Amino acid sequence: MKVLVVNAGSSSVKFTLFEMADQSVLCKGLVERIGLKSPRLVYQRAGEEQHDEKLTIVNHNGAMQAICHKLIDAEQGVLKSLTEIDAIGHRVVHGGEQFSAAVVIDSAVKDGIRKCSALAPLHNPPNLDGIEACEDFFPGVPNVAVFDTAFHQSMEPEGYLYALPRELYKKLGIRKYGFHGTSHKYVYYAGCAFLGLNPETAKVITCHLGNGGSITAIRGGKVLDTSMGMTPLMGLVMGTRCGTIDPGVVLYLIKNGYTADEVDVILNKKSGMQGVSGISSDMRDIEAARNSGNTDAQEAYDLFIHRLLNYIGGYYLLLGGADAIFFTGGIGENSPAVRESVIRQMSVYGCELDNEANKARGKQIVLSRPGSKLQVAIVPTNEELMIAREAIGLVK
């Protein structure tokens, strides 16, 4: 069975086509700059070089048409007919409380996604555009929505409630939802399989560290807590997001003449590693500047690690001890320095770093020494495969 995975953003559509018999990738690509100047298609068949192609499109429907033509292209395509596709899995950012698992899309589901757009106004509308474009080009093929927030819906009230008047939760849905759920779910189950842990009982901390980052405490496949909140702004220090701060700072800025929109830009786009270092939002640039003696970069790095350790330590206690910690994401998979800075502090939990193993980048590997009470590993994430699995599971 073949599954097409679609991730539609405001000006882009990413896609991956899987053969689920062996869970292999047949092709993948991206249509970017939709509705902007010089849109293009990036396309790559498995084991071959990437091809770029200029397009003349103005919307997601045009992007999907270009993708369909490429999939069945006589020279570069991987299908004889679009009817070979058995299901389409869509990444949808916000499912609110309405969606706690993946669902086959119908009119009621689309209405639910629209209602959740108030919680994710930059993401859910283009996600829905991608769904409706696929409905046009793949009539009769089941579309499945896989929500970034769904995995975190297993949290209990003490995990997701804010200490605000309850009426704000009931009327406006103000609560913690969490994000990166598809990644955390994939990494949890893949990591448990890798280490031989029973996913029905395992206690694991998953660290998705990239330009955006979040940490999740998982016990027996259920989320106890996660670092992102009602929005992706809460939690860790990120590339350009501030993470958790005193909410009084927002009030102080507004009282000192900043508009709500200006504060939004500061907290989401001008803070984090970029704001503190004044150099870059990219950890690679921060590490290079830090190694060259830049004190602002050093402080940004130290702040990143400090916040990370706070969450890991808190979640370790919340779980009553952990069996394993998994690193994933761009930083988690590719920064030996960050992993070493964290794991060195875990000796108190009976974890010892394997220095040679920690040199690895982007591959699944155990980072803790044999005999460590607490195991640590890199588990590369694969959100597209997780979406494909969820889709095919429902269609079957």
Image (cartoon, rainbow, N blue to C red):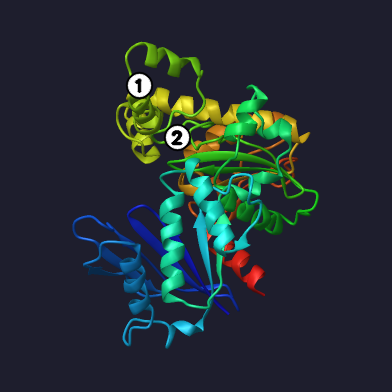
Quadrant hosting residue 196: bottom right
Quadrant hosting residue 127: bottom left
Residue topped by disc 2: 238
Estimate the x, y position of residue 67 in percent, counting from the top left: 36, 72
The answer to whether 2 is drawn above or below residue 121 in the figure is below
Task: Answer left or right for 134 relative to 163.
Answer: left
In the orientation shown, which residue stands out farthest toward the left? 37
Q: Residues within 10 Å of mark 1 (few under 14, many from 20)?
A: few
Which of labels 2 and 1 is toward the front? 2
Is 204 or 154 nearer to us in this picture? 154
Task: Answer left or right for 123 relative to 149.
Answer: left
The amino acid pointed to by label 2 is Met
Q: Residue 295, which numbered label? A: 1
Q: Residue at x 53, y 32 (%)?
A: 341
Pick the quarter of the image with the N terminus. bottom right
Pick the quarter of the image with the C terminus. bottom right
Estimate the x, y position of residue 92 in percent, counting from the top left: 51, 54
The answer to whether 32 is drawn above or below residue 298 in the figure is below
Task: Answer left or right for 348 relative to 59.
Answer: right
Mark toward the start of the polypeptide (2 vs 1) = 2
Q: Can residue 394 be seen in this view?
A: yes
Q: Can residue 380 be seen in this view?
A: no
